[in-house]
């Protein structure tokens, strides 16, 4: 900075200015190099602490014109029900949410009736059990956090309703995590009851590897490979976190299309109104 | 008026738009009686051309003040003009007492003809405020300010309320949009030095609005009661504990208890509903102050020689800016609604578990970086105070007689350096407190203050000195 002022105040001391300027540039370069080099080290430390960064997978619903793959949501729900639901809740989902998304109304009603929920009190003041209805939330595996921790050796299986929104790069993270189990590298020891997974912050997760080829029987006959199940359940969870996704993108496309028409009109209107001002000619009349 | 008073009026008071207007009103009422229009017009003849500048200003002030003398003044120039135009004895709708505000400030209001699209960001900020208030009122109908229900009620809005997701995404992204618009608006003011006399009050009111916005956005972010809401609230309110002696009592008073809890959430909700209306009021005063002397312009020169009426010219130009902004805003709302947020805020608040990094919303990062650059809590809070003191003092720190950076090559460079400095501060604000970031943040923080407290005052003097030496 000093170079600006010196340059101004005293033009004759250009040499001083130049050397100062060179010094300042060296300083800036050195600082940049220092920050750049440290950044590498920090990123490595960061991946150990916060988990390996997942790859970017081409989700079919990523594009601005893309909706969810609803067959995948249906399969994903089956994976959730048969594998995840033993420990994880999706407390924000109701049976009704599945209607028209992954199942027909009759299918969901039938699914709901398999569960008993406590309702009441009735006319005598007693609580009673009844089959679940469309308006009921999906059942939770544990009554509360304490119960969940007790059943899982102190670890708390998080609710999955918002999991893809509540983690950095959520969909890719869930997918990578589910497929990321491997033997710990040399020098890394994992405590009894924990499993090595480089995508999990800290590298040791209490959830064992849950997906294995053929672990689920899909009702549409898709071969249930490990990665197929991971993909489907991630799509299901992405939908659970953002059920408005399809409607949102459709509305966005329509709205931005209309706005761009309005924008063209507005630009035309502006140019029309400004034309007289822009085409003015200023004459300096020196005679009068 | 006595010579001494006159010097006072012309020397100091013109810097304060409101007082200036008040003085002209009082002096004109006491000195003159309303004259017939013809007399005024005859005064405006050749004699007007021969008048000294100061006398002309006095005369025009008196003429202006007549509007305020009596509503039924038959010689009111406005009324006469209106009659001439419409040919009716009745005052036209737009000149009725209430609606004349619209005529004066949105239709006939003269704006410099050369203002560019950066002058649209004030109205864009106004639109953002409107969107925030409108969506906020509807969100409040479905939201529950209780520690056990707040998070769930937000999800209820997202899932069960018809169009609720749109309301919430508009509101959440609208806050970011508001800050983007206001930051661009401020940097425009810095580039073209719109804060220079006679618009000091406009700038200072703007800084007050920024402070109110920061407060509103901060307490608004607490309402969804996610992890970042809770821990952000804990960290920021705890800053008050840095105040010596009474600090801890103040924190307890802010919280309404001994930790961030239900009482805190309730009062934050109440204040979050109140503050936007105060911002709206402050914005109206901001505009009123602006309309005393009118807008600055890219050349920074007196624009009274060439002005255009607000309608249709400013309106059609702003319309283009508004619709473009609508597209920009919509891209976030519809296609990347959580891009500007933090994933941790989708985890319900848990006082037993601290997130790995507590990061404020992006628009606070630059201030946050300055706060963290000082290794002492009280020092950090004092530094933030100094940031806003610098902004408030800017019109009085600057020494240049030239406004626009177009004519100030060094100021132009300093402007871009300041912008880069703020971006660096923003980047540092989201990094952990570790070795290269801390030092870079400290250098950037020091540079921020040096810009306002050293470069700005010195530059004007150097420019004056240099231009004198060039002239001789």
Image (cartoon, grey):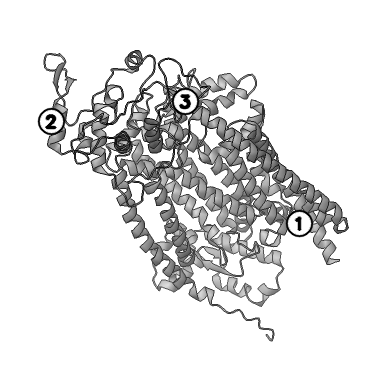
| Residue B404 visible in the current orientation | no
- Give the spatial CA distance, label 1 vs label 2: 95 Å
Instruction: Identify residue for label 2.
Output: A110
Residue B383 lies, with reference to residue B263, above or below; the image says below
Query: Which of pointers 3 and 1 indicates the residue nearer the eye?
Result: 3
Q: Quick one: SS at disc 2?
A: helix
Residue A285: % across, % down: 66, 83
The chain letter for the residue carrying disc 2 is A
| Foreground residue among B439 and A53 | A53
- Looking at the image, which is closer to me, B377 or A240? A240
Protein chain holding label 1: B
As helix, strand or loop, the secondary structure at mark 3 comes to loop
Residue at 48% of width from left, 64% of height from top?
Answer: B317
Q: Foreground mark, 1 or 2? A: 2
Q: Residues within 10 Å of mark 3 (few under 14, many from 20)?
A: many
- Quick check: marks 1 and 2 in contact, CB under 8 Å? no
Percent x, y of residue B69:
53, 58
Using the rendered view, name the quadrant where residue A158 is placed.
Answer: top left
User: Seen from this angle, which residue lies furthest front?
Assistant: A186
Q: Which mark is residue B398?
A: none
Quarter residue B60 falls in: bottom right
Dot label at residue A203: 3
- State how far apart marks 3 and 1 are (Cα): 82 Å
Residue at image coords 36%, 50%: A63
Residue drawn where x is 67% and y is 62% of the image: B406
């Amino acid at each position: 900075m000093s170079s600006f002022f010196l340059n101004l105040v005293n033009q004759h001391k250009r040499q001083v200015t130049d050397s100062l300027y060179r010094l300042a540039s060296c300083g800036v370069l050195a600082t940049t190099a220092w920050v750049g080099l440290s950044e590498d080290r920090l990123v490595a430390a960061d991946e150990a602490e916060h988990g390996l960064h997942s790859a970017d997978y081409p989700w079919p619903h990523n594009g601005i014109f893309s909706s969810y793959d609803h067959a995948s949501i249906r399969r994903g729900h089956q994976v959730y029900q048969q594998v995840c639901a033993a420990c994880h809740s999706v407390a924000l989902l109701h049976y009704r949410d599945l209607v028209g998304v992954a199942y027909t109304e009759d299918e969901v009603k039938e699914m709901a009736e398999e569960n008993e929920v406590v309702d009441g009190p009735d006319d005598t003041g007693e609580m009673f059990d009844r089959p679940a209805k469309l308006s009921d939330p999906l059942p939770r595996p544990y009554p509360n956090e304490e119960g969940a921790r007790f059943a899982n050796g102190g670890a708390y299986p998080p609710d999955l309703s918002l999991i893809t929104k509540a983690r950095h790069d959520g969909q890719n993270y869930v997918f990578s995590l589910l497929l990321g189990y491997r033997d710990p590298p040399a020098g890394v020891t994992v405590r009894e009851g924990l499993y090595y997974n480089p995508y999990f912050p800290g590298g040791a997760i209490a959830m064992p590897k849950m997906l294995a080829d053929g672990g689920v029987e899909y009702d549409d006959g898709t071969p249930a490979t490990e990665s197929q199940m991971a993909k489907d359940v991630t799509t299901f969870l992405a939908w659970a976190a953002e059920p408005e996704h399809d409607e949102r993108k459709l509305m966005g496309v329509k709205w931005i299309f209309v706005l761009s028409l309005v924008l063209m009109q507005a630009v035309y209107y502006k140019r029309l109104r400004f034309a007289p001002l822009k085409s003015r000619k200023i004459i300096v009349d020196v005679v009068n | 008026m006595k010579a001494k008073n006159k010097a006072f009026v012309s020397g100091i008071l013109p810097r304060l738009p409101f007082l200036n207007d008040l003085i002209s009103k009082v002096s004109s009422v006491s000195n003159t009686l309303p004259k017939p229009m013809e007399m005024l017009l005859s005064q405006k003849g050749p004699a007007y051309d021969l008048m000294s500048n100061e006398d002309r200003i006095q005369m025009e002030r008196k003429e202006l003040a007549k509007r305020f003398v009596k509503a039924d003044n038959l010689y009111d120039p406005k009324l006469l003009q209106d009659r001439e135009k419409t040919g009716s004895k009745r005052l036209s709708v737009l000149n009725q007492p209430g609606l004349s505000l619209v005529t004066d400030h949105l239709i006939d209001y003269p704006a410099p003809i050369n203002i560019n699209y950066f002058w649209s960001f004030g109205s864009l900020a106004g639109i953002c405020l409107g969107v925030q208030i409108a969506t906020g009122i509807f969100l409040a109908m479905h939201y529950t300010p209780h520690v056990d229900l707040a998070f769930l009620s937000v999800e209820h809005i997202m899932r069960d309320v018809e169009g609720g997701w749109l309301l919430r995404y508009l509101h959440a992204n609208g806050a970011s949009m508001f800050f983007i618009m206001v930051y661009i608006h401020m940097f425009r003011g810095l580039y073209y030095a719109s804060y220079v006399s006679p618009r000091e009050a406009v700038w200072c009111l703007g800084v007050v609005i920024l402070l109110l916005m920061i407060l509103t956005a901060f307490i608004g972010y607490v309402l969804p009661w996610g992890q970042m809401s809770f821990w952000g609230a804990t960290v920021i309110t705890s800053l008050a504990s840095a105040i010596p002696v009474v600090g801890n009592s103040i924190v307890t008073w802010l919280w309404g208890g001994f930790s961030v809890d239900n009482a805190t959430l309730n009062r934050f909700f109440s204040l979050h509903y109140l503050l936007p209306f105060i911002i709206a009021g402050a914005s109206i005063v901001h505009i009123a102050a602006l309309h005393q002397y009118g807008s600055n312009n890219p050349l920074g020169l007196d624009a009274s020689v060439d002005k255009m009426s607000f309608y249709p010219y400013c309106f059609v130009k702003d319309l283009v800016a508004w619709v473009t902004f609508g597209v920009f805003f919509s891209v976030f709302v519809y296609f990347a609604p959580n891009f500007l947020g933090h994933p941790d805020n989708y985890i319900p608040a848990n006082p037993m578990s601290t997130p790995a990094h507590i990061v404020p919303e992006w628009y606070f990062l630059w201030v946050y970086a300055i706060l963290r650059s000082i290794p002492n809590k009280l020092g950090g809070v004092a530094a933030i105070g100094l940031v806003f003191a610098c902004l408030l003092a800017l019109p009085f720190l600057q020494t240049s007689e030239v406004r626009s950076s177009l004519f100030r090559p060094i100021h132009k460079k300093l402007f871009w350096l300041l912008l880069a400095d703020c971006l660096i501060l923003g980047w540092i604000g989201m990094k952990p407190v570790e070795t290269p970031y801390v030092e870079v943040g400290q250098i950037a923080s020091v540079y921020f203050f040096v810009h306002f407290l050293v470069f700005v005052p010195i530059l004007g003097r150097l420019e004056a000195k240099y231009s004198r030496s060039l002239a001789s």
